[in-house]
Image (tube, rainbow, N blue to C red):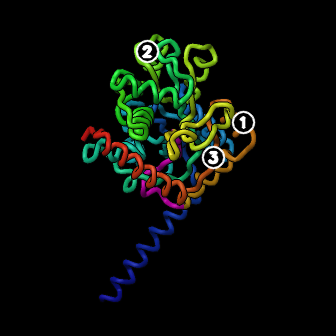
């Protein structure tokens, strides 16, 4: 009797595996949704729509983009984490919810990236750049800015798109590495922050190059340096902050995620298709036009990168006493 029960259990298990494999083989059999945890029209949204169009052609299924902004990307990422793990709800997430939010929010965060999500393909790196209001700050190099900040300790203001964002932590890291002190002015998003920077309400900011470049070209802002490890591809004449502060890095990056229990064959299929698309010359050209760098990083490497970024920014936040927990 005992042997019979064991055999029956084994048959049930094998049947479940067979059914799962059959479902994986039929994937996709209905529309796929890509959740973008930010408003429509931004860099992340544009990348998601580029990928969705390609996936529709390659997979033969409808691929929808759903914008769900708020809380620095956390609301949209939580939507993915709590979705059915069947490959029909995936997301395109960024630095803030994946590598900053766990330390910033602690137990208040509704998801834990390492437990609730699988990060299966990094697709882009977007340089942050250091800009100043040219009327309020006369410095045009990083050393000149540091000298000015030291002479005006606590008087220089820097803006960000919100507490704990990559823009905010870039400013905190800059202060820590230069021994200077600024006043942080957080906004609900980059749009209003840039408006106030141009009008002189705040002095400096670190933000994504696609947003700032038109204002630099118009002379409304002065770009001093990039926050990339070395000079960025969009303009080799612009120095990197790291040339003056070795080790300084504060870039934004994006990658695709799925609920943690999503079957591996489906994850692997999506990862392969997306990374192949990001490797195309025309995709790289389009990304460069957006001020971004196209990459095609696989799951294991991307997961390790997120872990290292989480620890790096955790250290910066602890030193600056930045928390929302």
Mark number, residue 140: none
Q: Is residue 123 left or right of residue 187?
A: right
Examine the structure image and report whether residue 44 is included in the region drawn in magenta: no
Spatial CA span between label 1 and label 2: 32 Å
Mark number, residue 196: 2
Residue at the image point whose x is 37% and y is 56% from the top: 115
Name which of mark 3 and mark 2 comes first in the sequence.
2
Q: Which residue is mark 1?
A: 285
Q: Is residue 297 left or right of residue 117?
A: right
Where is residue 51 drawn, in percent x and y?
62, 40
**Can residue 286 be seen from the camera position used here?**
yes
Q: Give the overall secondary structure of the magenta segment.
A: strand
Nearer to me, 315 or 2: 315
Examine the structure image and report whether residue 259 is included in the region drawn in magenta: yes
On the rendered image, what quadrant is the N terminus found in? bottom left
Spatial CA span between label 1 and label 3: 12 Å
Residue at the image point whose x is 48% and y is 41% from the top: 94
**Can residue 165 be seen from the camera position used here?**
no
Spatial CA span between label 3 and label 2: 33 Å
Name which of mark 1 and mark 3 comes first in the sequence.
1
Where is residue 294 drawn, in percent x and y?
64, 42
Q: Residues within 10 Å of mark 3 (few under 14, many from 20)?
A: many
Where is residue 227 drawn, in percent x and y?
53, 37
Vertical arrangement, residue 47 with respect to residue 137, above or below: below
Where is residue 172 drawn, in percent x and y?
39, 36
Q: Which residue is mark 3?
A: 295
Quick check: marks 1 and 2 in contact, CB under 8 Å? no
Nearer to me, 85 or 233: 233
Local SS, label 1: helix
Write down the region rendered in magenta.
Answer: 252-264
């Amino acid at each position: 009797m005992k042997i019979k029960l064991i055999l029956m259990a084994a048959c049930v298990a094998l049947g479940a595996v067979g059914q799962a494999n059959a479902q994986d083989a039929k994937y996709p059999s209905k529309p796929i949704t890509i959740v973008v945890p930010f408003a429509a029209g931004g860099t992340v949204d544009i990348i998601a729509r580029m990928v969705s169009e390609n996936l529709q052609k390659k997979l033969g299924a409808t691929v929808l983009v759903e914008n769900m902004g708020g809380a620095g990307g956390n609301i949209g990422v939580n939507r993915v984490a709590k979705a059915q793990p069947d490959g029909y709800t995936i997301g395109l997430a960024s630095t803030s919810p994946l590598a900053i939010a766990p330390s910033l929010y602690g137990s208040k965060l509704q998801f834990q990236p390492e437990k609730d999500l699988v990060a299966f393909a990094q697709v882009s790196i977007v340089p942050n750049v250091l800009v100043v209001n040219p009327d309020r700050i006369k410095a045009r190099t990083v050393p000149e800015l540091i000298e000015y900040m030291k002479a005006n300790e606590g008087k220089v203001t820097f803006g960000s798109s919100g507490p704990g964002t990559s823009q905010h932590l870039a400013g905190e890291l800059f202060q820590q590495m230069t021994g200077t002190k600024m006043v942080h002015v957080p906004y609900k998003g980059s749009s209003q922050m840039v408006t106030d920077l141009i009008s002189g309400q705040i002095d400096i900011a670190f933000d994504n190059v696609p947003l700032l470049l038109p204002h630099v070209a118009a002379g409304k802002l002065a770009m001093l340096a990039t926050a990339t490890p070395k000079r960025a591809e969009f303009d080799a004449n612009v120095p990197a902050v790291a040339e003056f502060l070795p080790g300084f890095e504060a870039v934004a990056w994006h990658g695709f995620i799925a609920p943690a229990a999503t079957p591996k064959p489906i994850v692997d299929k999506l990862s392969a298709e997306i990374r192949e698309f990001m490797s195309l010359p025309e995709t790289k050209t389009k990304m460069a036009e957006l001020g971004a760098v196209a990459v095609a990083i696989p799951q294991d490497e991307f997961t390790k990168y997120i872990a290292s970024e989480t620890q790096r920014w955790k250290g910066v936040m602890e030193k600056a006493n930045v928390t929302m927990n």
